[in-house]
Image (cartoon, helix red, strand yellow):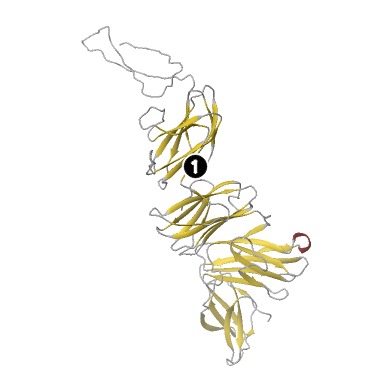
Amino acid sequence: SFRVGAGGFFVGSGGGGFWWLVLVDTGGGATTPAAVLLSWELRTVYENPALGPMVLVPGVRVTNTVAPGQMAYYIAETPAWSTQATNRLVTADDNLSVWHNPLQAPVGTNENDVRLLGPARSGTSVIGTNSTPSLVPGSRYHLGIQNTNAVPVTFVLEMDFDVTPLENSAPISSTLSAMPLRYFYHDATAAETAVSFQLRDLTDTADLVVSQTPYPTLTSYTYGSFNAGTNAEEVIVTVDTDPVALSPGRWYVGVFGRSNAAYTISAVGYTNALPRIVTLYNGIAQAATNLAATAGTNDYYRFVVTTNALRAQFELGDATGGMALVARKGFPPPELGSCDYLSSNPGTNDETIVVWDGSSPVPLTAGDWYITAVNLAGADVSYTIKAAEWAARGTNIMALPPELSSGSICLTWTSLPGLRYYVQALTNLSSTNWVAVSPTIVAADYATTYCVAPVSCMFFRACAGPAPAW
């Protein structure tokens, strides 16, 4: 056996390209058995190693320094939905060239190497499925940043796919293509306290997903809106939103639907000071005090309605002074003179707003609903507030056969757990003077029973809502 070693130095030349190892046996050798090559090795050591390859994150700028006579290498992973990619040399201290190769790291002389940019200090190159070089959806391509200068050069590189910018309050109308999804982005500023992403004017079903990480999907997103049919979609992100609060930077927006579905999408940023907004949870009452003198007359709340809800109810009770309750679907929170729904009973009576999937002017749909408790007393007022939803409308109350129990008539009717009911009575059906004969009854099940002492020729009915004075 024998080992062959060789060494060489190529100073001032690039190491890119093909390298060959050739072994020549000039000394003869044994023929029985014949000589056998046991192993071989080719190792190339660069005096100034090249950078990379680094995987580029769409929309994220990369700052790096490339040594003289060297290349910095990058990889771009093309998603299956993409039809074009934008490669930007944002800035550079000196002229650089940007090379492209679909199969391997480019060196400027490899097969399929194409110079996209340069030599230049900045520039933009867009490649698409029909361009040269071409973009192959679902595959990767390679970039090489070449420095032919005698000194190191620092540069900034950015890559992104066909993602359309959403400028503040500038709607974009479009139609979904054969691949029924499209991506947008909104660059939130430090001054924005809230952003409302809106998908409207739908001609077919479409969903809206939002994330800071590219690219959100129907199964991987931070926030989403998934209303049925052609109902509008909206996602609201504020500086207080959980689990991810609004922060400056790029937010990605995905529209998923059916091909040929038309839509209008927009991002509306708000820069006004955001009031404290308390999130309400389904069926859980919260006690609060409005400090009219020091904190203003409005308290703001948020309730997230889920996709299967057919009924939502917002209630304010136990008030120690006059209050009103207003509600609105979407941002901004409602005010007394600007709201979708209003409840303003006199004095300290309870306030209730009920919204069904067929309500007017705004039907119940999934997403953020904002509720404002308005102090009308001009002084500090304590109260409780609650929001709840149901997967049933609860509008058709069915009376079950009454029963006698211990000398009382027990009335039973269908109900929704958590809803409030009361019983009224009448001595003559020709009269309209129904009188409450029960306090407010909070249903604990889908059937509720209340027993009253029998009175001659009495007629009874169950009503939804809080009982009037009785």
Query: For the N terminus, which image quadrant?
Result: top left
Q: Residue at x 27, y 8 (%)?
A: 26
Between residue 20 and residue 69, name the one nearer to us: 69
Would residue 377 be seen by someone viewing this image from the given angle? yes
Between residue 460 and residue 376, name the one nearer to us: 376
Seen in the picture, residue 152 relative to 205 is either above or below; the reply is above
Tell me if 151 is positioned left or right of 325 in this view: left
Seen in the picture, residue 183 relative to 369 is either above or below; the reply is above
Between residue 339 and residue 83, name the one nearer to us: 83
Query: For the C terminus, which image quadrant?
Result: bottom right
What SS does tag 1 mark? Answer: loop
Q: Which residue is mark 1?
A: 58
Would residue 225 be seen by someone viewing this image from the given angle? no
- Spot occupied by residue 281 in the image (x, y as percentages of width and height): 60, 61
Q: Residue at x 68, y 66 (%)?
A: 373
Instruction: Please give the count of numbered marks on the rendered protein.
Output: 1
Amino acid type at image mark 1: Pro
Tell me if 230 is positioned left or right of 189 in this view: left
- Spot occupied by residue 310 in the image (x, y as percentages of width and height): 51, 68
- Spot occupied by residue 298 in the image (x, y as percentages of width and height): 71, 63
Q: Residue at x 35, y 30 (%)?
A: 111
Tell me if 157 is positioned left or right of 18 in this view: right
Extreme-top residue of the structure: 27
Graded by Cα atoms within 10 Å as few (under 14), some (14 to 19) or many (20 or more), the crowding at tag 1 reads many
Between residue 285 and residue 86, name the one nearer to us: 86
- Spot occupied by residue 450 in the image (x, y as percentages of width and height): 59, 79
Seen in the picture, residue 436 relative to 219 is either above or below; the reply is below
Seen in the picture, residue 313 relative to 253 is either above or below; the reply is below
